[in-house]
Image (tube, grey):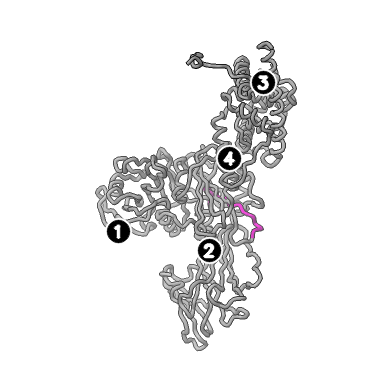
Amino acid sequence: VSGVAGAEPVEPPGERRAPGGAAAAESFDAFARRQRRPLVAFAWTLTGDLGAAEDLAQDALQAAWQAWDKVGSLDSPGAWVRRAVANRGAGHARRAGREHRALARLAGRPARAVELEPADHQFWAAVRSLPERQAQAVALFYLEDCSVAEIAEVLGCAPGTVKVHLHRGRHALAEALGLRVPERTGTGEEEHQ
Amino acid sequence: MSSSDEDVGVQTELDRRGREAAAALRRSIDTLVVDDANDAPVPPGPAVISLGQPTGDGGRRGARRWSLAAAAVAVVAAVGGAVALLASGDDGQAVRSRGPVDHLLPGPLPAGFEPVHAINIPDPAAMEFGFDIAIYGDPDTDDPWTATLAIAHLVADEELLGGPPSNGELVTVAGHDAWLRESEGIGGAWTGQGWEVEWQVDDGRLIVSGAVSREEILAAAEAASTEPAIDPSGLPDGYTELARGPFVDTMLFTSLFEGNIDEFGLGSDDGPGLAVTYADPSNRDAVRTAVVVAQHPGPTSAVDLLHLSFPDAEETTVRGHHAVIGRSSEPPGSAGAEGVVAVQWAEPDGQVVTVVGFGVAEYDVLRVAQGLRPASTDEIAALREERAVAAPRQFADLPEGQVVVATGESQTGQWRIVADAGSHENVGALTIDRMWGAIASTSSTTGDRVEPPLDLGADISDGTIVVWGVLWVDAASVTAEGPGGAPIELDTHEVEGWSHPVVADSLPIDHFDQGADVVIVARDADGREVARNSTVLGSGG
């Protein structure tokens, strides 16, 4: 299973552009410059806040730099930094987002924001409403065109687990976007009362 | 349509939405995230990022500083030492034993800003003065800092502390003589009158001070120890420890002591802390906007001590760490409309970082704080070497209609007396401008007449006293006279269009005996006194 068909090629975490040793030979400078925007985008899908996303991306890159001897020699350094972003968790990201918005508000300036059509904003807001791991899997699936194996590498779980996250996440996403009628839950007795 | 067909249709539509949303997001990110300095790889250095704390100087310092801090400043000034204080961690262990500090440098700075001054914050162990403090309050109240109870342990020789305490009501605390007196409180957050008790201990003083009743302060003092701590049995109901640590007033190293670096030995030794002032060197305004980044070893529990300097300080988060942010516009105009903004937090490696903005928008202060990065040893060494002394500053050009009457130099800066030539030599016609160090400055205009016919003003900063005013009588000379030094004749100056000359000159702050009455005397050509001013440099002036 790979990412959604037709997605534009981006910088996948699996380092398809520089697989294996090629990635290892890459300088951190080049790696950081190539990965920064995709990392910010991924972090934004989880936070909805550009400032927080930039911080998360920068922190992940800094962590990579500090361990570059190890990270740079991995098959997929890109997966490593995405995991660093994901592992910070939605809670941390939300706090960081509030922090940035508060700073902007205190300064009386509008916060920098990602400009999207309402439908696109709705899509990513729906992604963020998913449980944390589902949101991460779905974000990587759509944003980075990741395969199940690549998502599993980023999230540090089994491919089978990713399949479950993706299935449930996409199902819930379709419901949240009104593409599918929500399934009824409960015993059904409510309808008879 | 079958259920399966419906599922395929839903997934297809979902994927289409996802592709479009992803593409749009990538385009937007490409536009917003520019290739700037942040794109550069993180420079060599430890994985630490933190921020630090503040307060003003003589001109910029917030007016509502607490008495203990003021006392500490006085003591330190008397010693000729600095103010960094003993650093006790949460566990009572010396924080400074944790090892060298990992220094941080800013990423993006406000436009035009660059390092203009760097000084060390000395190792408390190398000094003979310590100031540990613990603050207690009721965390369940809306603002626990409005009614705090504090215990401070001043560690210093008795001589340094100015002799045994003696003012107030003599009481007995835990079997020892102690002095009880009313207090205006610890920190500006106090909303009412309070009390304090002071007594000698083996290595210095203990002071318990709080916005509590007389009975409560005495009970707290009975339960006090030199840790310093107050046993819960001596605390008012609901009180618990809010903050603890060495009281290191970072701004003392960046503003108040500007111009006194050599005098206090702050610029000589290699201290564990560092305070760097960033400003626009081309800014010739008397009030130079600046950002100061200061860091020194300290415990996390010390972060909230910023409340003592900023009554309305609030909790916030900086780089994921608990932080406190304070704002002050006092004294009015000292730092422009933006005032003083300070944010402080602790890094995991055991250092407290403070970022202070003078006249800088809060957004920019926090941006600097967020953007700090670890610095290499070489970077810090170069910074210390190149910026140990701030470059001399230049006054801005005067607006039309104003003329410079006199100029002079102080220890690290300069002063000038400006006359508004278009007005009479009366109230408000003369202004003194002073600037020294990286950001320090004062400016004031002659006010109400106090002691005619020799109405004078005086400004004491940067190791220099500047005396100025209008000489309303015919006199051949004007001299400053006092014990401990020879009389100094002060220059007088003519101002075109004015019928009386202007006295404007400076003298070293230590020329006469400290605290002595100094008088300014005007004499005629025969040496007869024709006017005298005994207030402007009098001991009570």
Residue corresponding to mark 1:
B168
The quarter of the picture where the N terminus of chain B appears is top right
Tag 1 subunit = B
Question: Looking at the picture, how far across and down is residue A172, in whole percent?
Answer: 60, 21
The answer to whether residue B288 of the structure is visible from this angle is yes
Q: Quadrant of the C terminus of chain B?
A: bottom left
2 or 3: mark nearer the eye: 3
Is label 4 on the same chain as label 3?
yes
Q: Real-space Cα distance between discs 2 and 3?
A: 64 Å
User: Element at badge 2?
Assistant: loop
Residue B147: x %, y % from top left: 37, 48
State which quadrant residue A55 falls in. Answer: top right
- Of tags 1 and 4, the one toward the viewer is 4
Q: What chain is tagged by disc 4? A: A
Q: CA distance from mark 1 to mark 3?
A: 74 Å
Residue lying furthest front:
A193
**Residue type, numbered disc 4:** His
> The residue tagged with tag 1: helix, strand or loop?
loop
Label 1 crowd (10 A; few <14 / some 14-19 / many >=20): some
- Which contiguous range is marked in magenta? B269-283
Chain for numbered disc 3: A
Residue that carries the numbered disc 4 in the rendered image: A100
Nearer to the camera, B151 or B411: B151
Q: Residues within 10 Å of mark 3 (few under 14, many from 20)?
A: many
Q: Are marks 4 and 3 in contact (CB under 8 Å)?
A: no
Residue A63 quadrant: top right
